[in-house]
Image (cartoon, rainbow, N blue to C red):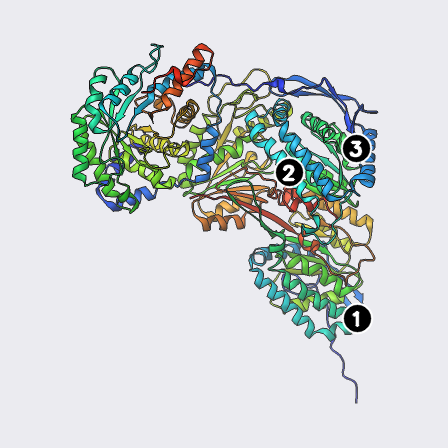
Amino acid sequence: MSERVAVRKTYKLFIGGKFPRSESGRSYLVQDSNVPLASRKDARDAVLAARAAVKGWAGATAYNRGQILYRVAEMLEGRREQFVALGVPADEVDAAIDRWVWYAGWSDKLPQVYGGANPVAGPYFNLSSPEPTGVVAVVAPEQPALLGLVSVIAPAIVTGNTVVVAASPAQPLAAVTLAEVLATSDLPVGVVNILTGRISETAPTLAAHMDVNAIDLTGVADAELAADLEVKAAQNLKRVLRPAPADHDWTADPGVTRMTTLLETKTVWHPKGV
Amino acid sequence: MTATATSARSDLSELGRSETALRTFLHGLPGVDQVGAEQRAAQLGTRSIKTTAKAQAIDLAIRMVDLTTLEGADTPGKVRALAAKALRPDPADLSCPHVGAVCVYPAMVPYVAEVLRGSGVHLASVATAFPSGQAPLEVKLADTRAAVAAGADEIDMVINRSAFLSGRYKEVYDEIVATKEACGDAHLKVILETGELATYDNVRRASWLAMLAGGDFIKTSTGKVPVAATLPVSLVMLEAVRDFRAATGRQVGVKPAGGIKTTKDAIKYLVMVNETVGADWLDPDWFRFGASSLLNDLLMQRTKLTTGVYSGPDYFTLD
Amino acid sequence: MFEYAPAPESRSVVDIKPSYGLFINGEFVDPTDGGSFKSINPASEEVLAEVAEAGAGDVERAVAAAREAYDKVWGPMPGRDRAKYLFRIARIIQERSRELAVLESLDNGKPIKESRDVDLPLVAAHFFYYAGWADKLEHAGFGANPRPLGVAAQVIPWNFPLLMLAWKIAPALAAGNTVVLKPAETTPLTALLFAEICQQADLPAGVVNIVTGAGDTGRALVEHPGVDKVAFTGSTEVGRAIARSVAGTRKKLTLELGGKAANIVYDDAPIDQAVEGIVNGIFFNQGHVCCAGSRLLIQENVADRVLESLKRRMAQLRVGDPLDKNTDIGAINSAAQLARIKELSDAGSAEGAERWSPPCELPDRGFWFAPTIFTGVTQAHRIAREEIFGPVLSVLTFRTPAEAVEKANNTPYGLSAGIWTDKGSRILWTADRLRAGVVWANTFNKFDPTSPFGGYKESGYGREGGRHGLEGYLNV
């Protein structure tokens, strides 16, 4: 009896809820699979999709966003073995699932922890609340492929931002597979967009893009490239998360800075009178 | 007047005919933000009025005083003395102008009238069951007619706050119209008793109601409730007379009363008049202070400006 | 008519020295490699003092002094002691506020009633507020052991010289940093008087250093490799350059930049208060305010009425001697700023907007600009897009709330906004949608040390004021 011929998977980009090939038609080989080599145009398309998703996602209730992030954890749990098969260590998959759960809980707590009433010296109601900054470009860390990726996406989107992620060029399969999880988790289209390919090609486009509000350089290992991207980001004063140190411990408590850097604080005043 | 203002004028004359029309109009007036109004009033209070401007302001303020006594203990002797003071506030300085009016209860009007006759100082009488207004309309109108008959040429009526606060605007309106009619040629000042109206929105509505019904002046207070005239209340009323003139062409006067005791206070009011409604109202015909102790402070400050030394209460008459 | 006689505040309450050195390591020192420049009174063009211009070597000395003070004194000092120094400074400012207010008005041109009633009380309040944080940082919500960053380089603008100094220095010191601050070249004097106050408070040497100078001094300071933190308030253009210059470094950056705020007046607004808010929004401090309500958006069905009230109110504004207690609008800060205001206003006329100013006599000497409004402005006009930073208001209309929000947000800036309506739910709906860091509803231009201030988009990032203001000075 001959062995069954396996059906191989075609890995694609994830833009606006769809899985397109690169418009450039290019791909590169990773673990015997062809992975799209995203172009500048793909990056721009991803920004358009992310921008279109901002209104709905930022406007969703915090409760709703929390539920959706928890749904992502549920779906990831269900596909645990798939990631292990890709070579992601089992404990890393577990940590990645737990991280989604951790961030899911933040959605309706961060505004309370990070915002609040200010006791101004006058007859005014004065309230500060955090709001998402908008579209965030993210360069995902090289390692750990899944936990690192989840650890940069979740804090950006839990507060209502949408993201365009440049996945690790060396480890893109976890990213594309995560996209499949996201696509089936009730996450509105365009909230997360994932590009595979060369960072040197996609990241400068994203850093210079005037309709991107913030850039997370966590995964940029090359200090010179990171500085160059930060210079580009200055053109429209993007909020910047600088590269993580090479020895960053991704299993440690992430803290809130990843979330708060991608937030704007809005303070509303109103007189109190009769 | 522009075409718009003319058409607005004809619209307003119909408002008094129905409760619904009045309510719709009064509730459609722009709201007043308490904090903003009070800040504006406080800001005007920081103007620094010195030297020549101060001298000018003091004389104007003296001419605007409605020298008032409204006590159960008022007697013919007391009010005659007050009237004498109204004519010659500072016996030591004949350049000092006389006050705007003397304001007393109706029963005291005849005694004051004897003193003021031909002087140019007006004689105001409170009426309409002052200060509460809680009497039948017939009584209030009789009160008014009696005061006018006795020689008052200005009547300070109180609005029916009971009707106003329970939303019977037409009743308030009709009473003012009837009182105005009872006044004959006497000028009608309509006391809103703003301390009982509680909100600036109510002050604005009551101001418009009084003007629509024909009041010649709107006045803040009776002086008989804990909160009398304040700068922000007067600001809201000045805005009302300003807007009313813009809409109808008719100018209405304003009289803050009660609690204005010092020259500094009086000057703050004049600054407010100057910067809210302008020079047209900087005249005793259009702005008055209902006060009693204010006059002596004005006189002391006036003396200080002319002599350069601070005076004391012993040098001014206490009538 | 009721003419107000002149009511000048006495300038003799402040003693201005003929010349000032740099304040480095607790002492006034001569610049080693810099020259000097003159600070003038913009209301008279009279020279007030000769001020040292710090060169790169002076910046080096100042940063070194700040580093040493950080390492040896201020960093190790318990928070409760830092607090006491800040409380002490707050008290001295309150005691000397009249002197500081007069000096501020002389050097900046702003009316004494504003320096006296707004700037100085807020300056003292800021030090008082942040003093109390110095020994409570672990309760500020930034984790268990929040650490200072080190040396902060701070560059401030000329519109609120002493207040911006307070916004910068108070939180930096409370968090345990030391600072090198560069005041604006047209308004250095109150910062130098503040340096004397630091001496009077016995603040340890090197904790606060003041280097005076222009753009080159500022550049040398923010680009100095020895600083850990850069805080800048000023134009978006310079902010961009600073953001580029710190790229690839460890320096933490806070930027508070330009604005083009929309002040939205709905048809049910409390009109008299709205008019006050409009006036305060654009004419406060001669419009030299980054959060000024420079774009007035009026609902079309009340536009005529609001404009009529606004013009009547503008006719009451008193323009002139900043030291006169009755002056509402003082002098434009500099000839250069006046030229910019004129250039943009001329562009407004040239592009077809209708210009109006109340009759108003301007003094012969000094830099002056009458309060001005432009009606018939559209989003395409330069005066609706560019920050004028002067007493010039652009008036636009809208028909629906959605249109108001769309126009309000249609700018690269996002610092502040105003909303005027009596309807509560409309306020909250609008506030939710405005992309601006500070939203004033039924009020405008209110500030408080407890209230975070800062922008969205190209108006900068980070917040100053409140608990949020500490974050920029802590390693979190």
Q: Nearer the viewer, residue A152 or C30?
A: C30
- Observer able to see residue C436: yes
Residue lying at the far bottom in this picture: please name it.
A1
Q: Residue C459: x and y, percent? A: 63, 41
Q: Are marks 2 and 3 in contact (CB under 8 Å)?
A: no
* Chain holding disc 1: A
* Chain holding disc 2: C
Judged left or right of residue C294, residue B57 is left
Residue B247 found in image quarter: top left
**Which residue is the site of mark 2?**
C128
Dot 2 or dot 3: first in sequence order is 2
Residue at disc 3, secondary structure: loop
Q: Report the Cα–Cα distance between label 2 and label 3.
A: 21 Å
- Which kind of residue does numbered mark 1 sit on? Pro
**Which residue is the site of mark 3?**
C205
Quarter in which the C terminus of chain A is drawn: top left
**Which residue is the site of mark 1?**
A89
Residue at disc 2, secondary structure: helix
Residue C56 found in image quarter: top right
Q: Mark 3, residues whose alpha carbon is within 10 Å: few (<14), some, or many (≥20)?
A: many
A126 is higher (above) or lower (below) than C64: below
Q: Are marks 3 and 1 in contact (CB under 8 Å)?
A: no
Looking at the rendered structure, which numbered label has been put on residue A238? none
Q: Nearer the viewer, residue C31 or B162?
A: B162
Q: Residue A74: x and y, percent? A: 65, 71
Q: Nearer the viewer, residue C91 or C383?
A: C91
A252 is higher (above) or lower (below) than C469: below
Q: Nearer the viewer, residue C251 or C473?
A: C473
- Observer able to see residue C1: no
